[in-house]
Amino acid sequence: MEFREIVENNRSYRRFDQKRRLDKTELLELADLARKTPSAGNRQLLRYVISCSPEINSRIFETLGWAASLPDWPGPQEAERPSGYIVIVTEGDSWDWARVDLGIAAQTIFLGAAAQGLGGCMLGNVRKEQLREILELEDNLAIQLVIALGKPVEEVVLEKAGRGDSLTYYRTEDRVHHVPKRKLTDLVIRIYD
Amino acid sequence: MEFREIVENNRSYRRFDQKRRLDKTELLELADLARKTPSAGNRQLLRYVISCSPEINSRIFETLGWAASLPDWPGPQEAERPSGYIVIVTEGDSWDWARVDLGIAAQTIFLGAAAQGLGGCMLGNVRKEQLREILELEDNLAIQLVIALGKPVEEVVLEKAGRGDSLTYYRTEDRVHHVPKRKLTDLVIRIYD
């Protein structure tokens, strides 16, 4: 797959074929990709919790808020839930540049999954105290982001958003998920050539 | 190139073959990859300034601090400077999740460059007021990060860092750049399978 195709296939998916299990090796390979990414000041503050255990997965699932822009949808039903999770935590408190490292690592995991025909969703709406207890995290570790992973069964389509158009994603009756994306000409504000 | 190879080739490079020019199309394609990445709440707050103009490049260069851990090195000399820049700015003030979007977009640009045999460095140490004037940015735009790009001429090697080892990158006399990276077993703190 060309890199451009990986980026284009890498959408935020929220419904999965739960019968397609993930194994520890697949998740460790994704964490190893994240390990090899640039890190601000090379400080490497991110740590990873991985789960492909159905029991722990279902407990993690209970801590997650799905799709803020779809308030009538409580998240995926049983059989369409993620097969694995990578929870990214930081040692110590939040350094401003650790947030950038977080995006770098999460996107690399995401693209690595897309290159394998997998997909997922980055979830920031997490009941952190509940998740901290489930994962028995030490006090010096702060939960930053949960990456849910699985085999997507959802169609996600990018739509062109003009200036002033709504950026709220939506679903149509055919269960297709639509995501308005701004145009390149609206995002590139200066070109010097 | 396999995705894993792209990630492994994607190091932070600080010396380039300046004779290898970049053109507007190459930089716009990288910005278009960033456009297609996930964005927190789909808010899409990032904007891009691109330059492959030798004159503007040299003015941008003057605003950059290179390699905090190599205090004796003032940055690349003429002939080894970047051939292009993508400056990422945000509209409005800094939202905590925009920092994560910044990492997502910057890493996607970086990997897209690596897939083309290019490379670069993410620079956060920027004289922002000076750069703001050069780019004639409106007051509502905040400079977040400068991505320097070019054809790398530097060898960068990952070294294994044990617990307690220094994470400071260094150069040896052969001009090879060494980057200590923590081991996977130190980064993955829980495995549930």
Image (cartoon, coloured by chain):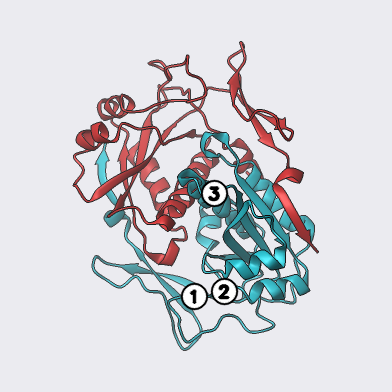
Chain colours: A cyan, B red
Q: Nearer the viewer, residue A89 or A110?
A: A89
Q: Position of residue B186 (x, y in %)?
A: 73, 43
User: Which quarter of the figure is the N terminus of chain A placed in?
Assistant: bottom right
Can you give x and y, in whole percent of width and height, for residue A29 in the image? Answer: 72, 51
Q: Could you say whether the residue bearing mark 3 is in a helix, strand or loop?
A: loop
- Asked if residue B31 lies left or right of residue A186, the reply is right
Kind of residue at disc 3 = Asp
Q: Neighbour class for label 1 at 10 Å: few (<14), some, many (≥20)?
A: some
The kind of secondary structure element at disc 1 is: loop
Label 3, label 2: how far apart the Cα atoms are:
30 Å
In the foreground, B112 or B141: B141
Q: Residue furthest front?
A: A139
Upstream in sequence: badge 3 or badge 2: 2
Q: Report which quarter residue A43 is drawn in.
A: top right
Marks 1/3 same chain: yes
Q: Is residue B2 visible?
A: no
Q: Which mark is residue A93?
A: 3
Callout 1, which amino acid? Answer: Ala
* Residue depth check, mark 1 versus mark 2: number of the one nearer the observer: 1
Q: Is residue A28 above or below residue B9?
A: below
Q: Helix or strand or loop: what does disc 2 sit on?
A: loop
Distance between the alpha carbons at the discs numbered 1 and 3: 27 Å
Q: Please name the amino acid that badge 2 sits on.
A: Arg
Residue A173, how many percent across, how many down?
A: 46, 89
The residue identified by callout 1 is: A67
The answer to whether the residues at label 1 and label 2 have Cβ atoms under 8 Å apart is yes
